[in-house]
Amino acid sequence: MPMPSERDYLFFLLSKQDYSKAQLQQKLLKRAKLTDVEIVQLLDEFAQKGWQSDQRFAEQLIRASLLKGYGEKRIIQKLVYEKQVDASLVERLLCTQEIDWTTQAKMCYQKKYHDDVSTHIDHA
């Protein structure tokens, strides 16, 4: 049975912000107070009870990334490679969001260059 202090530690972390399951696992491994099996059991408990959700975490990060003007590849890199969220979950979420990547690219251009991209397109 996981130590109450590790459970409290996870509650503390999740009360501040959402984390992916892999991020929490790394944090628990660094503390070295639980075995690998206990860590998996504790994280599974948190996921089953809805206290931690990779889907919720990914949805939030996608929304925040879109506001920052990130494109599809950057969002995938951040979620899959940096935060270690399952790639199929990320792909599914990106498909269901119905994101207009062209509009996203235009917003990014306008933010960076303070210029309307349509003025540079030849309307011949």
Image: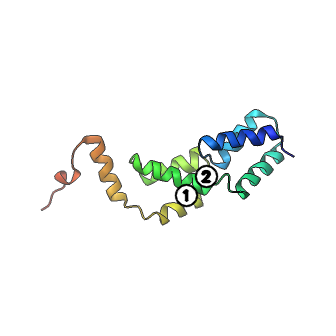
Residue drawn where x is 55% and y is 49% of the image = 79
Q: Is residue 115 above or below residue 50?
A: above
* Neighbour tally class for label 1: few under 14, some 14-19, many 20 plus, Cα within 10 Å: some
Q: Which residue is mark 1?
A: 90
Residue 6 visible in the shown view: yes
Kind of residue sitting beneath label 2: Val
Q: Secondary structure at mark 1?
A: helix
Q: Position of residue 30 (x, y in %)?
A: 73, 34
**In this picture, residue 61 sits left or right of residue 18:** left
In the rendered image, the residue lying farthest to the left is 124
Residue 76 visible in the snapshot? no
- Placement of 11 over or under 57, stated as above or below: above
Q: Nearer the viewer, residue 83 or 53?
A: 53
Dot 1 amino acid type: Val
Q: Residue at x 60, y 40 (%)?
A: 16
Label 2 – label 1 distance at C-alpha: 7 Å
At horizontal 33% and vertical 52% (from top left) the residue drawn is: 105
At x 75%, y 38%, the residue is 29
Q: Earlier in the sequence, mark 2 or mark 1?
A: 2
Q: Which of the pair 118/3 is nearer the observer?
A: 3
Q: How is the image coloured?
A: rainbow
Res 75 label: none
Residue 44 image position (x, y, % from top left): 75, 54
Q: Is residue 20 left or right of residue 29?
A: left
Label 2: which residue?
85
Mark 2 in CB contact with mark 1 (< 8 angstroms): yes
